[in-house]
Amino acid sequence: MNAVMNPAFAADDELRELMCAVESGTRATCFRAVKLDRRNFLKLTGLAGGGLVLAFSMGGEAGAAAANAGEFAPNAFLRISRKGAITIYSKGPEIGQGIKTAFPLIIAEELDASWSDVNVLQAPVNPAVYGRQSAGGSRSIPDSWDQLRRAGAVARSMLVTAAASTWKVPASECSTRDSAVWNGKRKLGYGALVAKAAALPVPDAATVRLKERSEYRLLGKSYTGVDNHQVVTGAPLFGIDQTLPGMKIAVFQRCPATGGKVRSANLDEVKKLPGVRDAFVIEGNGKTTEVMPGVAIIADTTWAAFEASKQLKVEWDESTASKDSWSELVKRAVELSRLPTGEKTLVNAGNVEAALKGAAKTVTGFYTYPFVSHAPLEPQNCTAWSHDGILEFWAPTQTADRALETVAGALGVTVDKIKINQTRVGGGFGRRLMNDYVCEAGAIAQRYNAPVKVVWTREQDMSHDFFRAGGFHSLTGGVDAQGKLVAWRNHFITFTHDGKVPSSGADWAANQFPGLNLPDYQLSHSLLPIKTPTGPWRAPRSCSVAWVIQSFLHELSAVAGRDHREFLLEVMGEPRVLEGGLNTGRAADVIKLVTEKAGWGRKLPEGHGMGLAFHFSHAGHFAEVAEVSVDANRKIRLHRMVVAGDIGPIVNMSGANNQCEGGVIDGYSTMLGLEITMENGRIEQSNFHQYPILRIAHQPQVDVHFIQSDNPPTGVGEPALPPVAPAICNAIYAATGHRVRTLPLTKEGFRV
Amino acid sequence: MSALTLRVNGKERSADVDPNTPLLWVLRDSLGLAGTKYGCGMALCGACTVLADGEPVRACSTPAASVAGKNITTIEGLAKSATQLHPLQEAWIEHDVPQCGYCQAGQLMSAAALLARTPRPSDADIDAAMAGNICRCGTYQRIRAAIHSAASRLAGSKA
């Protein structure tokens, strides 16, 4: 196999790079797009701690996009009118993670604005000005924290200077609060200072004073989302809601088996159907992340396009298309699982063989989890228009910055001929880190002389996903006579697209817990080749491996006859920071908090059980306790999930709670009944009747508690999800003595 | 294609469409009312829920001609006026219900139908009335709390 020759493999390389970029803590990677255009108003400044912070020499040009005449716009993040109206630009995509509220709150805090004076707008896509404009890896808050604070602090400092010179007092005798500068009892509102502040030189963002946490007035409280009024009144915020004069609707039919090419299609018949304007074949470049081969149908309305696509008959050339079969892959994995060690050993610490031989008790387990789909409720869509020498897009994407380069490369144009407008996104979960639907819309718009909105049907959305990869783990662990964990061996059977490295989202980090917490540990993998696209799914890797790790730890604690809480705390050991960022002290703190809040150890009603799990991911430490009941027919009810997390200081408490509540529901929904299977390369699930997302009747009570440590703030979109499945399975074991080793739960006969 | 007249949010609206066109696409593409969402096209997710004579219907699977003569209410018509939101909308904002927000129009319309016939719903009433609406982000806990809160507010205003 040759990775260079096959574009599908190249696409997978890009996916891995993308995962690295969105998850990386190195800001250099995250500011990759800065290479596009380093204008003179941007510079990267090295700061203490080895990180880079985006600084801006905030001349008029930076704020020019934002500022109306007579306003104060010291940078591209905010402007203030003479009447005191404060407009803050939120730079990143809003995908339901609440960033359009959180980002402006950070700026408003340092500006000392009254939140009621602030109006929030979506920033234009321009990574040369804004830096990272992506939503992924729970990186938005940690990567933008300093940048946004400094954007607000620069403006505050200039307003203070303006007020001080008006009063002819030293700036040190002035303070700020409630959108005003104060000197004793006299005050000047920010609006009154606009003219004077706008004439001042902009200070170096790296040198302005930032507030101490004790000085915060806004952060840490609860705020309703800034777009909520528009959401509840049905305003056209989403990608799929975009309209342009003369706009047509397109559907694009790809081969049901990934990689199939169009041999022929009944285009002449389709073109005669009611409302259809055109139909044509797009060869594409064969990259799943860009443009796959298919047939575009352009029609006056969405319904006309959908109806016409039902009449479309395509003969596909499937000679190089996916033939993947889940049932065959499972068989192969079961055969491989008999080998204690896989084809490649990734970690071999100590002597795991000897440690297992010396163990007082050992346990083996074979764990299986399925492929799953992102299934955002807004299907993939994008509006594109080729006009005036440019290609303009209205895109519900998680990676607006990266889309510029991807789209330009895929369509053979230069980045300066691409304009991307960010819309609100009807659910991301990782699906929209990829911009295939944007590239596709561009390829169609290049062939059609009017704006075109490409709308995917639900069936297309579910079959052409970058799925969370399934996986298999053959585990052996041992405890000593005192019930202490002494050995852990894992043969991980996973997937590959290039025959060399695991597929996107299907690998295991060498420093993954508990690898660094015990001396005798072995991790190996075997790779099964597939062509079905895989990719990052909410809390990539963690969303699947946390279930395996935390379930198996519970198996070991049970065989040792230990209390799971004590066992887990013992594995954590002394407070220290391990490679990869796991802080065992912070871990122990959330484990202690969650068990206290859940009433760990209390007597439960008959048929009830309580389960505990911990996972560290995306810089967040999360421990969760599930309380379930199971009846004789394996009907289960998740009564309550208690969540304890440490992500440092909270920006918007309501938003942070909402992410955890949603993470619990998402985790429960997925582990309970969701599974994607494929046969002959075709995805077997097409719509929600075959992909039963959890409904309100099965919603558990979710109680969320945060330890607001003094660590830097980190993201919360993902890390509450991974502990959900193991906490529930450990609770099922506590209630029934049955160990769940295959997901979804319905595979083992459980139902709600 | 033929002219179809619908009564939407209190106004007569006409659209030149095939009468079998689902109500969803007449609302979105012909009448410019994009608040009603497409999620599945099979009446499985509830994102397209609107009211026809007060009853919740899935607009994606309802031929437009079949609701001619009925009073159609969409999310754009749920509030009495631009300044006076429906108590459910107020409760949704107060409880910060939305995450991505895509399903919320459908959730609100199902909830509005529920409160119209059951002013003080129990949790079981909510489970039954909202069973057809998926929230992929998992905001169910807040949806439930907001419905109870709006019901209390309505009861208070009538007392």
Image (cartoon, coloured by chain):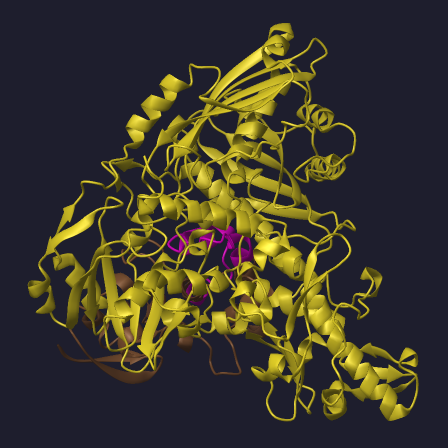
Rendered view: A476 above or below B113: above
Asked if the stretch drawn in magenta spans residue A75, the answer is no
Q: Is residue A429 left or right of residue A708?
A: left
Rendered view: A227 above or below B98: below
Q: Which chain is displayed in brown in the rendered image?
A: B
- For image coordinates 59% across by 41% down, the residue present is A640
Residue A583 position within the rendered picture, expressed as x and y whole percent measured from the top left: 72, 38
- Asked whether A752 or A238 is in front, the reply is A238
- Asked whether B73 or A733 is in front, the reply is A733
The answer to whether residue A525 shows anywhere in this view is: yes
Rendered view: A264 above or below A455: above
Rendered view: A399 above or below A526: below
Q: Quadrant of residue A277?
A: bottom left
The answer to whether residue B155 shows anywhere in this view is: no
- For image coordinates 16% across by 66% down, the residue present is A279
Residue B52 position within the rendered picture, expressed as x and y whole percent measured from the top left: 31, 70
Q: Quadrant of residue A34?
A: bottom right
Residue A518 position within the rendered picture, expressed as x and y whole percent measured from the top left: 68, 22
Start-end of magenta stretch: B115-144
- For image coordinates 63% across by 28% down, the residue present is A514
- Asked whether A277 or B61 is in front, the reply is A277
Residue B70 position within the rendered picture, expressed as x and y whole percent measured from the top left: 27, 75
Q: Is residue A508 left or right of residue B59?
A: right
Q: Is residue A614 left or right of residue A414?
A: right
- Asked whether B32 or A586 is in front, the reply is A586
Chain A colour in the picture: yellow
Which image quarter holds the C terminus of chain A? Answer: top left
